[in-house]
Image (cartoon, rainbow, N blue to C red):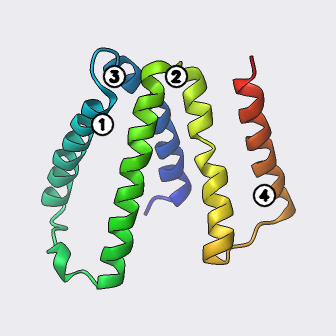
């Protein structure tokens, strides 16, 4: 089985590619319509993957806690996408993307507060450098 770090790197690469493709795609339409189109494509794409991998399960048979937290995650994802596409519509991708990637810092802080995770000194340094790098990248 592939290591989680490979998938994390793939996620970062595709998120970076997303910024460029979305900036081009949102140029002549509303950011909300762009987000809707993206969501429909994702639903179809993932539906095909789940079908061919024979992973379909009735979502209403999934345990209630998982379903609630996945629904909340979906809502926050939607809100993130709406904000992201709106920012891309009027801002340069080279500046929107670094600010968007502060999500990493937010995720770490929230995981510390709500999941009880802990960081080493080097990990704190890395989070600090990411924050500083974002600030430097967006300075004019």
- Earlier residue among tags 3 and 1: 3
The Cα atoms of the two marked residues, 3 and 1, are separated by: 9 Å
Residue that label 4 marks: 123
- Earlier residue among tags 3 and 2: 3
The picture places residue 108, in percent across and down from the top left corner, at 66, 60
Q: Nearer the viewer, residue 108 or 68?
A: 68
Mark 3 crowd level (few <14, some 14–19, many ≥20, 10 Å Cα): some
Asked if the residues shown at circle 3 and circle 4 are in contact, with their CB atoms under 8 angstroms apart, the answer is no
The picture places residue 112, in percent across and down from the top left corner, at 68, 70
Residue that label 3 marks: 26
Apparent side of residue 109 relative to residue 87 in the rendered image (left or right):
right
Mark 1 crowd level (few <14, some 14–19, many ≥20, 10 Å Cα): many
- Earlier residue among tags 1 and 4: 1
Residue 61 against residue 50 in the figure, above or below: below
Residue that label 1 marks: 35
Q: Nearer the viewer, residue 56 or 39?
A: 39
Residue 93's disc is: 2
Q: Nearer the viewer, mark 3 or mark 4?
A: 3
Residue at 20% of width from left, 49% of height from top? 43
Apparent side of residue 87 relative to residue 98 in the rendered image (left or right):
left
Q: So how many labels did they put on this image? A: 4
């Amino acid at each position: 089985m592939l290591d989680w770090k490979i998938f994390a790197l793939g996620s970062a690469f595709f998120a970076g590619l997303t910024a460029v493709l979305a900036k081009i795609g949102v140029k002549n339409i509303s950011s909300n319509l762009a987000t809707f189109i993206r969501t429909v494509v994702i639903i179809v794409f993932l539906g095909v993957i789940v079908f061919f991998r024979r992973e379909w399960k009735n979502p209403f048979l999934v345990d209630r806690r998982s379903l609630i937290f996945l629904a909340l995650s979906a809502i926050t994802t939607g809100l993130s996408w709406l904000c992201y596409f709106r920012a891309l519509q009027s801002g340069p991708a080279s500046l929107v993307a670094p600010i968007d990637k502060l999500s990493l810092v937010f995720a770490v802080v929230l995981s510390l507060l709500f999941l009880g995770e802990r960081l080493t000194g080097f990990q704190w340094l890395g989070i600090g450098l990411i924050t500083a790098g974002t600030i430097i990248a967006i300075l004019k």
